[in-house]
Image (cartoon, coloured by chain):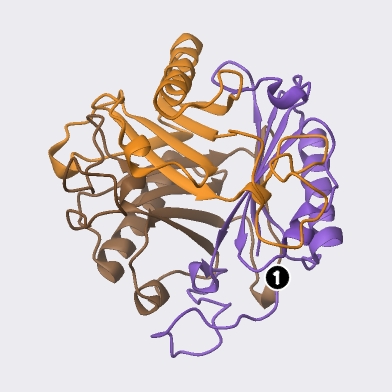
Chain colours: A purple, B brown, C orange
Amino acid sequence: MPFVRIDALRADSDRLDALGRAVHDALVETIGIPPDDRFQVLVSHDGISSTLRFDDYLGVHRDDGITYVAITMRSGRTPAQKHAETEPRNVFVTLTENESIDWSLGDGAAQYVVSPDVAGSPSAGLGN
Amino acid sequence: MPFVRIDALRADSDRLDALGRAVHDALVETIGIPPDDRFQVLVSHDGISSTLRFDDYLGVHRDDGITYVAITMRSGRTPAQKHAETEPRNVFVTLTENESIDWSLGDGAAQYVVSPDVAGSPSAGLGN
Amino acid sequence: MPFVRIDALRADSDRLDALGRAVHDALVETIGIPPDDRFQVLVSHDGISSTLRFDDYLGVHRDDGITYVAITMRSGRTPAQKHAETEPRNVFVTLTENESIDWSLGDGAAQYVVSPDVAGSPSAGLGN
């Protein structure tokens, strides 16, 4: 269910692949995302037609190894789960939350909503 | 008003164009978005410098025809509207909601806010 | 802290750079973002393998100079701050808000959360 965008600078396909695996493994280990629940967009920017900008804000030194990880997932994780410390210096993570009804994982269905009665508030989902 | 990102794998420009039209038509038909309210970023990933990752999570078989559709729009649609089943197997949709004040459609104005008195909560908008 | 994606059509690297600076300067001037708090993804679309779609919705004329600016930041800005009119005709802005706990700016830490006691609601942050 998490939908993840990963942006890196001048990464070859092996590095992109490694970044995608590392981010997914972290989600599986820290907040219990199922191993086969992986949906990612991985982009290497060439620094010319597309690029990344970053600073040493808050005293964290960053360099061209910077990796932006933008995660969209349903609300419900606890702050403690979110706080699990798994990322190295150069990884900048943002999380945006939405609700069960805000997902369709294919087949035109809203898989996290349990019944066709969708007139009320978002229903309990199918797990992760 | 919806702002839509569509990501596909090795799509030529005709396919990108068709995907953009199909997604917009679905929004027009199912939740009443105005026909000329179309704002999209369409990206084909070559599988090398940028790519998509996906699994058969929840028993939906996916292949290289996978299409990610990430929609940002103002809150206010009902679950029934969101639930309208319009998407085929390989289309993975996420929706993120924000408020009227969170949009500027150009000219430096927040078009969905009706008066210069913006000190209170988000105001009623101009329609969709 | 704001994480910003900027998408433009057929922009050379000088134009991308100028867009990134202009958007960041606007955030610094209008809502008090620190000058060194700049985290951006800048992408020029060639119009073939990736492209932008747009209309003249709500009577704003747009052309190939269209620029999409998608900002993710913590909630807390007032509508008046958000409403600050700084953007020209062709700039389409969306803002998505999340919470302090939803950020890691590197080093594997959630820098906006002030203590290791993260069991409660999002804590006060470190400034912007």
Q: Nearer the viewer, residue B18 or C72?
A: C72
Q: Percent from the top left, x then y, of residue B43?
A: 50, 40
C98 left or right, relative to B82: right
Q: Residue at x 30, y 70 (%)?
A: B30
Q: Residue at x 56, y 23 (%)?
A: C34
The C terminus of chain B sits in image quarter: bottom left
Q: Residue at x 44, y 54 (%)?
A: B71
Q: Nearer the viewer, residue B13 or A55?
A: A55
Determine which quarter of the picture holds residue C62.
top left
Q: Nearer the viewer, residue A14 or A41?
A: A41
A90 left or right, relative to B49: right
Q: Tag count in the figure?
A: 1
A16 left or right, relative to C47: right
A125 over C28 or under it: above or below: below
Dot 1 amino acid type: Tyr
Q: Percent from the top left, x then y, of residue A87?
A: 83, 42
Can residue C13 be seen in the rendering of this structure? yes
B108 over B99 or under it: above or below: above
Residue labelled with disc 1: B57
The residue carrying pointer 1 sits among few (fewer than 14), some (14 to 19) or many (20 or more) residues within 10 Å by Cα, namely: some
- Please, which chain is the residue tagged with disc 1 on? B
- Helix, strand or loop at label 1? It is helix
